[in-house]
Image (cartoon, rainbow, N blue to C red):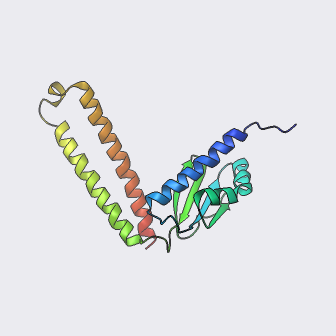
Amino acid sequence: MVSFEGAEDKMAKLLNTVKALRSQLAALNVATNAKPTVCVSSTSDDLLQMFKREAAVVASLVKAGEAIILNAGEADPAGCLRGFASDDISIYVKVIGLIDIKLEIARINKRTKTLEDFMQKLDQKMKMPGYETKVPENVRKENAEKMAGYESELKETKKQLETMEKLI
């Protein structure tokens, strides 16, 4: 009798990895007909073996030209942007030749400026005299959550910018 224990978990990780790769491709504005090379690595040997068996499935679902499965400890592939599918799965998309890196840097800089402006305006609101007493608690909570979201997105955007600048 064949045991399927853990198979559902592995399948969920495979599908989450595919979703993460597709999201990264969309975020980078990679053309849908580009057929990029994608890479996957994992710190788990079980997952690594599963990805090696299912590389063609990953490539097909991501609409990639090739899905390369990296062994543990292997260096990051050249010309690729790194992403994360989970704490034990890293994903890479080869962007050299697929996107205009300078245009992408300009887009990221524009988004950074927008986020900084949002944060400044919200900060001014939150520091107004009487804010704590005049503004209802639920609105103050929403504003605090917005600020945390802006900060988190700004941090990730700056990381993405650093990575892009290394590719120039």
The one nearer the camera, 18 or 140, is 18
Horizontally, residue 53 falls left or right of residue 160, namely right
- Residue at 57% x, 46% y is 87
Rendered position, 33 above or below 16: below
Most distant residue in the front direction: 33
Instruction: Tell me which residue sits at (33%, 67%) in the image.
Output: 106
- Residue 123 picture location, percent across and down: 21, 42
How far from the left and from the top, in percent, is residue 154? Answer: 35, 51
Residue under the point 26% across and 54% down: 114
Q: Is residue 32 positioned above or below 147 on the image?
A: below
Which quadrant of the figure contains the N terminus? top right
Name the one closer to the observer, 91 or 61. 61
| The residue positioned farthest toward the left in the image shown | 129
Name the spot of residue 54 as percent of width and height, x first.
Answer: 71, 55
Q: Is residue 79 left or right of residue 149?
A: right
- Residue furthest to the right in view is 1
The answer to whether residue 75 is above or below residue 133 is below
Is any atom of residue 71 visible in this view? Answer: no
Q: Quadrant of residue 128?
A: top left
For the point 74% across and 53% down, which residue is it?
49
Q: How many numbered discs, if any?
A: 0
Residue 147, located in which quarter of the rendered image? top left
- Quadrant (top left, top right, bottom left, bottom right) of the C terminus: bottom left
Q: Is residue 45 visible?
A: yes
Instruction: Judge by depth and name the residue closer to the eye, 159 or 99.
Output: 99
In percent of width and height, residue 86 lies at: 57, 46
